[in-house]
Amino acid sequence: MGKNLSIATISLLLVLASTKAQQVFDAPSDVASFNGKDGWVVFERIDGLTMSGGGVFDGKGQQAWQKNECQKDKNCNVLPINIRFNYVTNSKVQDITSKDSKFFHINLLECKKLQFQHVTIIAPVDSPNTDGIHVGRVRVIGATLSNTDNGVRIKTWPASTSRVASDIHFEDVVMNNVANPIIIDQNYCPNIKISNVSFKKIRGTSSTKEAVNLICSKSVPCQQVVLSDIDLAYKGGGGCATSTCANVQPAESLQLVLDKFVKHIRDYIATVLASSNPAGIIMFGEGFVDLKPFIDVLGTGWLPWVYERFILFLVTWGRAISGKFMLLLMTTHAPSDVASFNGKDGWVVFERIDGLTVSGGGVFDGKGQQAWQKNECQKDKNCNVLPINIRFNYVTNSIVQDITSKDSKFFHINLLECKKLQFQHVSIIAPADSPNTDGIHVGRSSQITITNADIGTGDDCISVGDGAQDITVNQVTCGPGHGISIESLGRYQNEEPVSGIRVTGAALSNTDNGVRIKTWPASTPGVASDIHFEDVVMNNVANPIIIDQNYCPNIQCSNQSPSKVKISNVSFKKIRGTSSTKEAVNLVCSKSVPCQQVVLSDIDLAYKGGGGSATSTCANVQPAVSGKQNPPACTNKL
């Protein structure tokens, strides 16, 4: 089998900087042989250790397990760990086995840059306190657990002094019939502060209905706890898997992030309560929701109406918060009556947040049908304010993905003073005749990216207002709607320049306009430059290419003087498809500040109606042309 090594012999081996374990080493069976020491093989204060060779450290723990009282008594007799690494640095342990340890198999204390590869741990399922590898400041990646009593767990012991557990991360873990797959259990000890913990890409099956259990301390609530891409199915009877949270204060102590809808935990929808802010966000989903927490925090006057589906009342989320957040949504409904908003211009408002993530496949249903009938904003710029479905004010370094905005009363999504904000796989839905329902409006924001969006609405699919800088729109489908617009510049005083706008790979179908730049006449001076539209497909689109510096709908302005917004460095390249209007290209620039550096390249737009081929019109502009020109550039000159 292998020879028995005395403790003295083992100690002698440990002076070596390289150890090869090529056979089976048997520990003494009798705990008394260790004279109260807490380790059998101890590597201490070694730099550059390599331990390998395929050997087995057999702890002979069977006798010791019968005497183990440590689960019941914290003052129990110390049992020896098979292998201890104390203050070991820049080292590697590989191709070894620890078997039947009396206590933990492998323990690390104050180690740094230590690698474990192809290590095997063996002990019976009923061997007490035989943790495989015990280590602090943990990152667990790519593990698979099968038929275990727990999954990935953080537990704190009772009656401890105040301590901290932080920077602990579990990722890409597969659970196969695992009880309690995700656990934070501070019922063991309420005095340990837990922070900066993540559970990401945890998937598989749970043998218990409660798949996620986050029980934090009342005295020191958990902070910066992340749940991301959790997919745990309960295979037993009695319904789907559930999750439990305790002592979770998202606005103050726990930041809960869910980047993807938890498919099998449908009975629990994320709720974000800010006890210091009675306008804190309230999120409901379909299914049962306990309303008591909302009564406790907000009072009965703030309770939402509950119909077949839940309603999300007017909310504001933010107040100079820094951190990562997530909304896990199904369908949420706004109040239909505009009076419910008390003149506010937003339904769901994210404000002054850095590092926001909004995701989950949910729908914001603005219930705009009643409001559309009262909309006078197309005729009167001093009209009553209608609420935008989702507002982002001063939001930075954030991602919005996999959500839908439906039937907003006014704009669907509005950005103000945002920076480094990404939109991915966002859907916008509203009828073609819904007034002023711009899909995504970008105002006074920079470094904004909109990709793979599907937008059908009653106004511009994407509109870019004054002050927008470095905006990228890629792979967007639009229709119905009014196209993609740099819009209504020069209407108001003190507008800021627009520059760095790039629209590529878009597809527009049956829209009232295509790609467009529009400015108001009789405007204050302004600038719009470095604007580029490329690789855009038009399908039965009216007015596919437009620069309109006489934009004045419903006679809301004076045409007595031309626009003073200077447009320059603009290109339309690889624009192709079909036009529903004979005039496919319309470049009408200002008399006072003619457009400069306008490029038409590879234009191929066919008019399918009667009365001849497509035409183009130019005024106060001399575009540079290249490639195919259908229609020919500047067929008509004004």
Image (cartoon, helix red, strand yellow):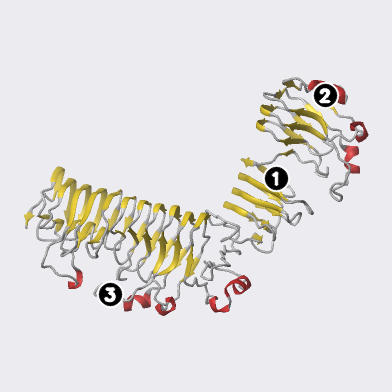
Mark 2 neighbour density, 10 Å: few (under 14) some (14–19) many (20 or more): some
Label 3 sits on a secondary structure element that is loop
First in sequence, mark 3 or 2: give its number. 2
Asked whether the residues under the numbered discs 2 and 1 touch, taking CB atoms below 8 Å apart as contact, a structural biologist would say no
Residue 149, placed above or below residue 363: above
- Crowd around label 1: few <14 · some 14–19 · many ≥20 (10 Å): some
Give the percent coordinates (x, y) of residue 252. 58, 60
Picture coordinates of residue 50, whole percent (x, y): 69, 23
Q: Amino acid at mark 2?
A: Ser
Which residue position holds label 2?
11
Counting from the top left corner in percent of width and height, residue 379 is at 24, 74
The amino acid on which the numbered mark 3 sits, given as a three-letter code, is Asn
Residues at marks 3 and 1, CA–CA distance in whole angstroms: 65 Å
The answer to whether 170 appears left or right of 347 in the picture is: right
Q: Quadrant of residue 407?
A: bottom left
- Identify which amino acid the numbered label 1 is placed on: Ser
Q: Earlier in the sequence, mark 2 or mark 1?
A: 2
Most distant residue in the left direction: 637
Which comes before the other along the chain, label 3 or label 1?
1
Front residue of 25/113: it is 113
Q: Is 185 on the left-hand or right-hand side of 630?
A: right
* Residue placed under numbered mark 3 in the picture: 382
| Residue on which disc 1 sits | 146
| Local secondary structure at mark 2 | helix
Q: Nearer the viewer, mark 2 or mark 1?
A: 2
Question: Percent x, y for residue 490?
Answer: 22, 62
- SS at mark 1 in the image: strand
